Structures are given as structure tokens and as C-alpha cells.
């Protein structure tokens, strides 16, 4: 690493909700900045007005905030290089496009849409594989390279619409070093004369991106692999603007792939395959189409950060669970893989489960209570007793991946069962076991101590005294109390329900089950 202060940016275009691939890019920028005591900047690249989607920028900021990876400088918090929204920087870019024209590295092009279309057809007819406006075809188009100086001047003065295109050299090699991919070499014959400045007075992504990275003193460009093909053009822009000495280092991150490894994980895949690909719920303002998010699915933000960190980066050992501080400590771009990372929805759930187990019971109780309140149930006992809800959460969390599953696992903590698991009753309920539960209920009624260890001892001793194997009535006991054949630790469950409730439930079962 050079001595240059680390300044990195996440530069999304507000064209819709932020895909988790984008979230991962933001995360890696954040981790890299934190690791090197640098600055993480959020810049909004909204030069393409046609693709602007209302609400998208807010969505991006909210998502980063929810995940605890907000930028310190940028559209939300401002900073020394404000404004951070490219549409508000509009007037800054023309000067640089002009500089490129003046130095002979860019030119004016006056071609109409029809003329461009005609060129494409002509090249296609001549069997050119990728028809482009490039070092060869530009020679037969209407631009300041083919027109005389005078004609060009006249057109400009007459206010004819024009774009400014980069003049890609015909026969050169562009080399640059990518931290993840090593040396990248591209021949200019494969590049086209991209538009840098549009007829609407706006720069294109390429010009605005490079100019802003320069003006904002960006030290490292960490972005998705889909931008790798643009990097040679950006390198040429740095060269032509005489900024090569401060060109950022590049790091192009691997793609996120579908679970089967077959292609890029797209915006559509999530709801189709049953897992979210967005951090937060999103409703498309134009079509009304809804997409689900990790937050609303009940994921913990730290679990999402943890799982995304490992999609493409490898810590070099087998550790999988990382706090944010540990990630910052361990992260390095050198350990980012070149090849695509397969998204595994089961693994995502596993991460949430791990965070659920580690979560504070009081926090889980708060979330669980909110979930129950949403269900609008009446007649629930103990629901306002937070230490009870906390106890329930403590017992249930081992069994769940999400708080939203708590209710189906543990509703019996708040309502006595009205049905009993059929299979277990069929198999285990008979005069002997009925008699056993009658005796057990009497023993429980007489016990002054209702701790789980005492209940367990009473259960075992009553079984022994009646010649019943404890193992043959354990599951039945659970069914009488909870209605279900499986669930959280039984004796702890009984302790939490309390003596009165347990005795009442056994009595009810003895009456109901003949
Ligand atoms: N605006 C680009 C995007 O939407 C940013 C690419 C870059 O980071 O250079 O992803």
C-alpha cells in the first residue's frame, strides 16, 4: 500500500433497489476503508436521467444504514467535495470533455440516430462481428475528424446537437494492474469510441466517474466485475487528462452467481427461487411490482453483513462467524477470489440462525412481542409479561432460524393446546400411561419447588415407582402440555409455564383423552 490516504467510494446509479451484489460492493468498500483508517464515500451516479427511479437513492441510503455500513462522506452526510450527486455536479464536467477535445483525444460527433443506425446496418452487411463507432468506422461518419475545422465550427455555432466521443487509438495495448485479477492487458482494437458527453449537456457515466474519482481523490476503485470492460477506457482517460500519477488502484469484485452456479444472480432470481436478493422490501413505483428484502424476512443486519462478506472473500482459515470488527481486522482485497461466488440460500438461513442463537433474549423478546402484536390475538396469557416472553425466547431460539418462526414453535406458551398430536396419542395413550399422568399430576401439585431439575426428578421417580420407562412417556408428556410432538427443552418449558398451568393442562388432558 502506498502512503496515499485511503478514500474509496460506492457509486450506485439510482435505477432501482440495490441488489445484494451492490450491497456486497458497498460492504467491501466499507471494510477496506475502516481497515485502513480511510474514508468511505457514497456518491450517486445519476447522469442517465432516463433510468432514474424515484425513491431509489433513499432506498440505497436506508439499506446501508440498516446494515450499519453507512458512508461518512457523501450524499447523506455531505463533505469537502459536495455535492455528491452527479446531476448536481453537471456544470463541472464539460470543461474536462473540452480539454480532451483540445488535446486531440476526443472529438465532436454530429451523427443523427438514423445515421448511426445506417452505419450499424452497413457494418453488419459487411459481416463485421461487432459493429461499433471506432477507430475505423469513425472515418466515414459526421464528426470533427472528418469535417473541416470550419464546418465543425459552423455546426457548433448553429447549435447543432453533438456528442463528444473519446478517440481510441487504433493500435495500442492498454495495461493496468487490478488488485484481484493481476495485470490486465487489452488491445485498443477491441474498444469503441464511447460517448463522454451527451447532447443533453450531461456527461456519460465514464467521464463523470473518472472526473469525480479524480476530484474526490479516490485512492481505490472497488467495484463489480461488470465494470472491468470499462476499465481500459478509464485508464486512457486518466492518461489523456494527465492524471496518471493519481490514478486509483482498481479491484474488480467477482460476480454473485445463482445457487446452481449457472449465471449471474439477477434481480428476478430472488422471488423466483424463494429468497430475497434485496436488502429491504421494495415496491416499484412505476409497475407496483413488489420484491422482498432481508430485513422484512427477519434477517439480522449483522448476519447479512457476515454472509455477504464471505461471498467472494476468504479469510484464509475456516472461521465463518465474524463480528463487524473482526471483519474489518481480517479483510483484505488480496484475499478476494477471482471466480464468481455461488449464493447459497440455506447457508444464508444458517447465518441468521447463528446470530439468533447469540442474540440477547431481551432483544428477541422485543421482536417476538412485536410479531405477536401484529397477529392481533386476544386471550393470550402472560403476553405483557416481558420477563416471561424473554424466557420463552430463550427456550425457542435453539429451534428457529427467524423470530417470525417463534409463534408457530411456541404459541403454547400463551395458549393451552386444544388438540394433541394424533400419532403420539395413538401410540402411547393407554390405561397405564393415563394412570401414570394422574399420579404425576398429584406429585407435581404437592411439590413446593417447581424448578426444572425438581420436575425432572419427580417425573423419573414417579415413572419408576409405577413401573413405567421414563422414555416411553416423555414425548407423551410434551404432547399433553404443548399439543406437539417436538419442541424446546421440556423440563425448562414446564418450569416457565409454572405449576398451576402445568397441573391444569395435565388435568384437562386426563379429562379430554379417554
Ligand atoms: N454507477 C456505477 C454503478 O452503478 C458505478 C461503477 C463504479 O463503481 O465505477 O454500478
Image (cartoon, rainbow, N blue to C red):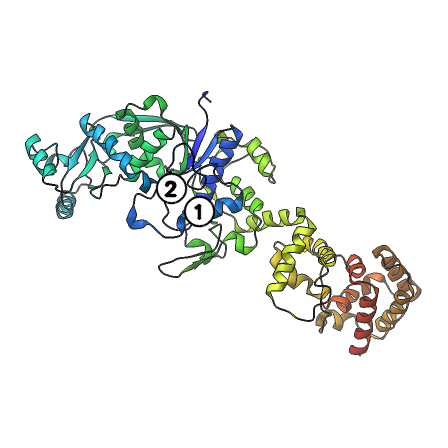
**Quadrant position of residue 501:** bottom right
Percent position of residue 228, x then y:
35, 35
- The response on whether ligand 1 sits within 8 Å of label 1 is no
Up-down relation of residue 404 to residue 507 (above or below): above
Identify the element where label 1 is drawn: helix
Q: CA distance from mark 1 to mark 2?
A: 10 Å
Q: Quadrant of the C terminus?
A: bottom right
Tell me where residue 31 appears, x and y as whole percent: 51, 35
Q: Nearer the viewer, residue 244 or 421?
A: 244
The residue where tag 1 is placed is 60
Viewer-nearest residue: 88 or 151: 88
Numbered badge on residue 85: none
Instruction: Answer whether labels 1 and 2 touch (C-beta < 8 Å).
Output: yes
Question: Is 455 situated above or below 376?
Answer: above
Instruction: Give the image location of residue 465, x and y in percent.
Output: 93, 64
Judged left or right of residue 110, residue 406 is right
Quadrant for ligand 1 reads top left
| Residue that appears at 69% across and 51% down | 361
Q: How many marks?
A: 2
**Image mark for residue 44:** 2
Please indicate whether residue 405 sits to the left or right of residue 205 in the image.
right
Relative to 272, is 31 above or below?
above
Q: Which callout, 1 or 2, points at the residue further toward the start of the chain? A: 2
Q: Where on the picture, by quarter, is residue 42?
A: top left
Amino acid at each position: 500500500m502506498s502512503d496515499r490516504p485511503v478514500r474509496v467510494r460506492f457509486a450506485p446509479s439510482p435505477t432501482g433497489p440495490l441488489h445484494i451484489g451492490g450491497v456486497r460492493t458497498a460492504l467491501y468498500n466499507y471494510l477496506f476503508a475502516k481497515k485502513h483508517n480511510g474514508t468511505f464515500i457514497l456518491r450517486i451516479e445519476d447522469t442517465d436521467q432516463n433510468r432514474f427511479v424515484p425513491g431509489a437513492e433513499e432506498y440505497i441510503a436506508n439499506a446501508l444504514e440498516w446494515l450499519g455500513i453507512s458512508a461518512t462522506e457523501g450524499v447523506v452526510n455531505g463533505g469537502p467535495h459536495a455535492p455528491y450527486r452527479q446531476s448536481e455536479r453537471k456544470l463541472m464536467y464539460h470543461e474536462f470533455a473540452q480539454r480532451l477535445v483540445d488535446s486531440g483525444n476526443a472529438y465532436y460527433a454530429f451523427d443523427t440516430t438514423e445515421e448511426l443506425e445506417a452505419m450499424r446496418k452497413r457494418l453488419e452487411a459487411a459481416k463485421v462481428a461487432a459493429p461499433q463507432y471506432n477507430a475505423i468506422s469513425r472515418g466515414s461518419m459526421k464528426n470533427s475528424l472528418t469535417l473541416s475545422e470550419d464546418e465543425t465550427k459552423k455546426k457548433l455555432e448553429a447549435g447543432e446537437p453533438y456528442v463528444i466521443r473519446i478517440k481510441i487509438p487504433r493500435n495500442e495495448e492498454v495495461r493496468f494492474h487490478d488488485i484481484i485479477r493481476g495485470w490486465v492487458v487489452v488491445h485498443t482494437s477491441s474498444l469503441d469510441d464511447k460517448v463522454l458527453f451527451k447532447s443533453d449537456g450531461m456527461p456519460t457515466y465514464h467521464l463523470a466517474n473518472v472526473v469525480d474519482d479524480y476530484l474526490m481523490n479516490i485512492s481505490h476503485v472497488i467495484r463489480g466485475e461488470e465494470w472491468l470492460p470499462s476499465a481500459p477506457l478509464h485508464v486512457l482517460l486518466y492518461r489523456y487528462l494527465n492524471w496518471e500519477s493519481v490514478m486509483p488502484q482498481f479491484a474488480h469484485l467477482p460476480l454473485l452467481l445463482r445457487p446452481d452456479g449457472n449465471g449471474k444472480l439477477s434481480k428476478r432470481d430472488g422471488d423466483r427461487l424463494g429468497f430475497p436478493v434485496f436488502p429491504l422490501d421494495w415496491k416499484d413505483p412505476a409497475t407496483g411490482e413488489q420484491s422482498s428484502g432481508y430485513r422484512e424476512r427477519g434477517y439480522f443486519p449483522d448476519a447479512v453483513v457476515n454472509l455477504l462478506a464471505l461471498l467472494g472473500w476468504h479469510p484464509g482459515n475456516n472461521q465463518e462467524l465474524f463480528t463487524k470488527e473482526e471483519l474489518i481486522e481480517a479483510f483484505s482485497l488480496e484475499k478476494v477470489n477471482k471466480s464468481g461466488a455461488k449464493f447459497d440460500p440455506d447457508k444464508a438461513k444458517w447465518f441468521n440462525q447463528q446470530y439468533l442463537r447469540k442474540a440477547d433474549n431481551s432483544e428477541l423478546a422485543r421482536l417476538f412481542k412485536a410479531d405477536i402484536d401484529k397477529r392481533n390475538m386476544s386471550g393470550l396469557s402472560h403476553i405483557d409479561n416481558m420477563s416471561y416472553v424473554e424466557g420463552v425466547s430463550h427456550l425457542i431460539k435453539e429451534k428457529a432460524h427467524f423470530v417470525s418462526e417463534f409463534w408457530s414453535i411456541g404459541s403454547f406458551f400463551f395458549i393451552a393446546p386444544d388438540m394433541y398430536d394424533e400419532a403420539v396419542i395413538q401410540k402411547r395413550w393407554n390405561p397405564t400411561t393415563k394412570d401414570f399422568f394422574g399420579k404425576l399430576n398429584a406429585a407435581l401439585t404437592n411439590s413446593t419447588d417447581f424448578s426444572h431439575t425438581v420436575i425432572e426428578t419427580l417425573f423419573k421417580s414417579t415413572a419408576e415407582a409405577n413401573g413405567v420407562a421414563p422414555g416411553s412417556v416423555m414425548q407423551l408428556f410434551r404432547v399433553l402440555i404443548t399439543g406437539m410432538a417436538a419442541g424446546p427443552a421440556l423440563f425448562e418449558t414446564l418450569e416457565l409455564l409454572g405449576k398451576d398451568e402445568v397441573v391444569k393442562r395435565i388435568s384437562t388432558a386426563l379429562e379430554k383423552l379417554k
